[in-house]
Image (tube, rainbow, N blue to C red):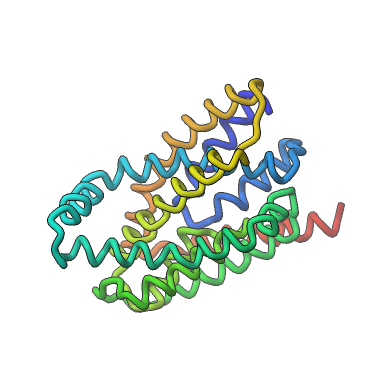
Amino acid sequence: MGIIEAIILGIIQGLTEFLPVSSSGHLELAKFLLGDHSVPEESLTYTVVLHFATALSTIVIFRKDIGEILRGLFQFKNNQELQFSIKIVLSMVPAVVVGLLFEKQLESFFGGNIFFVGCMLIVTAILLLLADKAKTTEKDVSIIGSVIVGVSQAIAMLPGISRSGATISTSVLLGIDRSKAARFSFLMVIPLIFGKIAKDVLGGDIHFTSAEAVPMGVGFVAAFVAGLLACQWMIALVRKSKLTYFSVYCAFVGVVAIVYTYAK
């Protein structure tokens, strides 16, 4: 993988991690179009590195929120911060279970299966359309709601299902306030990403050569910068109920991917 390709993939990851169009799905499509024929393990390694970059951009955007949560936790009281942290932990459980039990099966989807990605993008489109039609409320995330949103996050481990799109749409359909839904969606993924990276590093599952280090580093920076911009943009879009546009986009790309699979 060259420097230019790494920059392109990094920008795609940074934008699509927060915009509800599936970062993993777009990375698979982009790698296919750019002629990247990495085996699933190598492809997944690059995906994890780029997700790490966008996790850092999330921390930068929500640094005040994260600081307040940490300060509240160290008060050792049953306060809002503790309750929010419990909801975050509960939302992680489905993805952790799926990731541990079906890790090899998940890796197999990251090898250029364009037809599957196309189908999952259409599923994402349907979710976004339903969420945009939902009524606006001011409800907060509940304990049960956090688990249900966590299930959506676990399903979004499949390429083509937008993690932000699935979790925010599920939250909105549950009647949760749109701004709170976006905040919870972006914060809930941070521990998962860092946990995944720690597991892969300690387990020796991250594989890349010295020649790949520079492209990965460049892609990391590109994803981080693009993520900073996309995160703030997405928060504004969710508040204004502008998800239908992304629904149309996902449906279009999904159909194109499916048609291409049968036409080639």
Residue at 49 percent of width and 70 percent of height: 151
Q: Is 194 above or below relative to 103?
A: above
Q: Is 97 above or below relative to 16?
A: below
Q: Residue furthest right?
A: 264
Q: Work out which quarter of the rendered image holds the N terminus and state it.
A: top right
Front one among 233 and 58: 58
Q: Position of residue 77 (x, y in %)?
A: 13, 63
Residue at 31 percent of width and 62 percent of height: 239
Is residue 236 in sight in this rendering?
A: yes
Front one among 241 and 114: 114
Residue at 42 percent of width and 41 percent of height: 227
* Direction from residue 9 to residue 104 in the image, left or right: right
Residue at 68 percent of width and 39 percent of height: 42
Q: Position of residue 59 (x, y in %)?
A: 33, 43
Q: Position of residue 52 (x, y in %)?
A: 47, 41
Residue 87: name its quadrant.
bottom left
* Direction from residue 191 to residue 153 in the image, left or right: right
Q: Is 121 above or below relative to 146?
A: above
Q: How many marks?
A: 0
Q: Position of residue 90 (x, y in %)?
A: 38, 67
Q: Is 88 above or below relative to 28?
A: below
* Direction from residue 242 to residue 34 in the image, left or right: right
Is residue 12 in sight in this rendering?
A: no
